[in-house]
Amino acid sequence: MEEALGLIEVRGWAAAIVAVDAAAKAAGVRLVGTEATKGGGQIVVKLAGDVAAIRVGIDAATVAVQAVSKVAAAHVIPRPGSGLK
């Protein structure tokens, strides 16, 4: 079964760590990677897992990050194309 991909863009590395921690504790997701955007101090956190776990993980990460920083965007891709992996 193909894994879903979850993305959450937050402001700052501390918020990125909070996002990963919350998502991992809430659901069976795995960290694919992080990427700093150019300018603005935004960090994109990439998570993978089954669709339900990614939805729960992204929701939990969004709530947790909002307590310490800002969420610029959050999105779940249920069936990413092979070029996205």
Image (cartoon, rainbow, N blue to C red):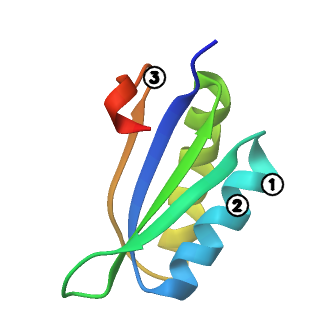
Residue type beneath disc 1: Lys
Please tell me whether residue 80 is drawn above or below residue 71 in the rendered image. Answer: above
Give how far across and how far down residue 41 sits, in percent: 30, 87
Q: Residue at x 44, y 38 (%)?
A: 85
Decide: marks 1, 2 in contact (CB < 8 A)? yes
Q: Kindly report which numbered mark, 2 or 3, lies closer to the viewer in this rendering.
A: 3
Can you identify the residue that label 1 sits on? 25
For residue 78, which numbered disc appears in the image? Answer: 3
Label 1 to label 2: alpha-carbon separation: 5 Å
Which is nearer the eye, 21 or 60?
21
The kind of secondary structure element at disc 2 is helix
**Image position, residue 83 (x, y; %):** 32, 32
Residue at horizontal 63 percent and vertical 45 percent from the top: 57
Secondary structure, mark 1, is helix
Judge whether 41 appears above or below 28 on screen: below
Eyeballing the image, is 44 above or below 46? below
Residue 16, labelled with which disc?
Answer: none
Q: State the quadrant of the N terminus.
A: top right
**SS at badge 3:** loop
Residue 2 as seen in the image, left or right of residue 11: right
In this figure, which residue is indicated by the disc labeled 2? 22
Callout 3, which amino acid?
A: Pro
Do labels 2 and 3 touch, CB within 8 Å?
no
